Image: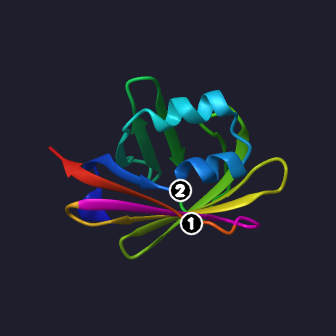
Amino acid sequence: MEPFIGKKYKLKSSDNFEDYLKFIGVGLLSRKLVMSVSPVTELTKNEDGSYTLIHTTSIRNVTTTFRLSEEYEEDRPDGVKVKSEMKIEGNKLIQIQKDPSGKKSKHIREFTDSTLTVITTADGWDGTCIRVYEAVD
C-alpha cells in the first residue's frame, strides 16, 4: 500500500451509488447533495501506525482514522454512527461497515498509480456500486 500513501484521487465516474445510498436509508435530500459533488480521496499513514482516509468535497470534508483489523466507530457522511473494520490485501483497502440496523456493507478500495476504484456491495442488496477516481497532482 505504501506507493499510494499520500496520493490524491478525484471522483470521475459513479455507477449505482444513489441506489446504494437509498438501500442504506440515506434520505432524498442528502442523496441528491452527495450525488452533486466529486470528492477527492487520500489515504495517509500516521506515525503511530494508524491510517487516515480523507474525503474532501466543496461541501464537507470527512476524515476517518483507523488501525488495521481493529473495529472502530465512525460517522457516515449522513450522520449515522456505524462500526467499521479495515484490512489491507495487496493494493486493496477492504472495509466492512455495519450500521445500527444491522445492515452490513463492504467497500473494496483498489489503488493503482492512476486510479482508485471503489466497489461497494451490501448484504440484502442485489446491486453493486462502482466509483472510479483518477489520480490528481
Q: Secondary structure at mark 1?
A: loop
Disc 2 crowd, CA 10 A, few/some/many (<14, 14-19, 20+): few
Give the residue type that dot 1 points to: Thr
Quadrant of residue 71 in the image?
A: bottom right
Outermost residue, bottom side? 90
How far apart are the two marked residues, 2 and 1, measured between alpha carbons?
A: 7 Å
Q: Nearer the viewer, residue 134 or 110?
A: 134
Q: On the picture, is 31 further left or further right than 133?
A: right
Circles 2, 1 touching at the beta carbon (< 8 Å): yes
Residue 132: within the magenta? Answer: no
Quadrant of residue 103 in the image?
A: bottom right
* Helix, strand or loop: magenta stretch: strand
Give the residue type that dot 2 points to: Asn
The residue singled out by tag 2 in the image is 16
The stretch of residues the image draws in magenta is 115-125
Using the image, tell me which numbered label, if any, was put on residue 109. none
Of pointers 2 and 1, the one earlier in the residue sequence: 2
Q: Nearer the viewer, residue 47 or 27?
A: 27
Residue shown at 39%/46% (left/top)? Answer: 46
Residue shown at 69%/39% (left/top)? Answer: 26
The residue singled out by tag 1 in the image is 128
Asked if 53 appears above or below 29 in the picture, the reply is below
Q: Secondary structure at mark 2?
A: loop
Tell me which colouring the rendered structure shows.
rainbow
Outermost residue, left side? 137
Task: Please provide percent x and percent y for residue 72.
Answer: 66, 49
Asked if 115 appears above or below 52 in the picture, the reply is below
Q: Nearer the viewer, residue 32 or 77?
A: 32
